[in-house]
Amino acid sequence: MNWPAEAIWEAVAPLLPGFTVEVLPELDSTNTELMRRARAGQFEPVLLVAERQTAGRGRLGRSWHSGAGDALTFSLGLPLAPADWSGLSLAVGVAAAEALHPDIRLKWPNDLWWQDRKLGGILIETAVGLQARYAVIGIGVNIAARPADGLSTPPAALQELAPGLGAPAALERIALPLVQAVQAFEQYGFAPFQARFNARDALADRAVKLSDGTSGTAHGASESGALLVHTAAGMAAVTSSEVSVRPA
């Protein structure tokens, strides 16, 4: 594949001194690799792309594999020091969705959805850096249709929305807006992204069930990025990303 590494570098480097773009034919996981590097003392800003992932990871330890051309899998690593980390995955989702297609919805806390099917996911991890924590922001987006593999709902694919849009072009759309969003989040927190997230909220005004058995109606994200759910006991602010939320 012909990746626009130089164009991305030219766009992003003025915002992130020392920034590099790296494309590898195969990796276990771009997040895992950047976390390995961080533990070895490498904290430079980098965009790491894998054409093929053999052991990609989703939230709650779910595995996520991709073949060359099937998906866009990459991680952005950079030192980051926001006053509050709450809502970062939502801000990242906003940036990715807005960059890719107006019809992409966001499912709290870290999924891209289209027509109630998962299109992509976000996984954020951090390591102890020198002056600030080192954030590793992983994004995976299905490009071509994927087998359902026992899933109750087949995954969505970007080429259903944008035929002909391959992984390299999708990355070029996302890279600069992603960096800009992360830097805005570092400075201002989630509040500036709240309305943008809620405009694409896939769960808005829908009956939802939390993994602890609580049921209610979702009412968007708060200014801090919590999911607001109206339950029998009143309005609850769901903050743990370990809570799985599903439309009831």
Image: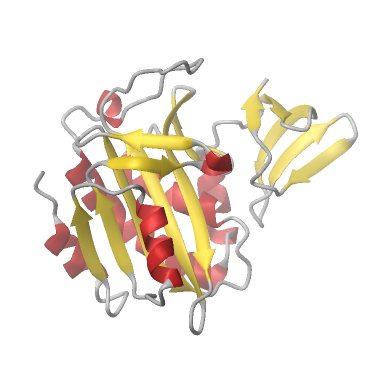
Quadrant of the frame with the N terminus: top left
Furthest-left residue in this view: 2
Furthest-bottom residue in this view: 131
User: For this view, does 142 lie left or right of residue 104?
Assistant: left
Quadrant of the frame with the C terminus: top right
Report the coloring of the rendering.
secondary structure
User: For this view, does 230 lie left or right of residue 193?
Assistant: right
Note whether 36 is above or below 231 in the view shown.
below
Residue for point 71% across, 49% down: 239
Please provide percent x and percent y for residue 221. Answer: 64, 46
Residue for point 27% across, 32% down: 143
Where residue 121 sits, quadrant-wise, is top left
Note whether 161 is above or below 39 in the view shown.
above
Please provide percent x and percent y for residue 95. Answer: 41, 51
> In front here: 63 or 217?
63
Please provide percent x and percent y for residue 222. Answer: 68, 50
Please provide percent x and percent y for residue 113. Answer: 45, 31
Where residue 182 sits, quadrant-wise, is bottom left
Residue for point 64% across, 46% down: 241
> In front here: 241 or 39?
39
Residue for point 69% across, 37% down: 219
Where residue 39 sits, quadrant-wise, is bottom left
Note whether 231 is above or below 236 in the view shown.
above
Note whether 131 is above or below 3 in the view shown.
below
> In front here: 36 or 216?
36
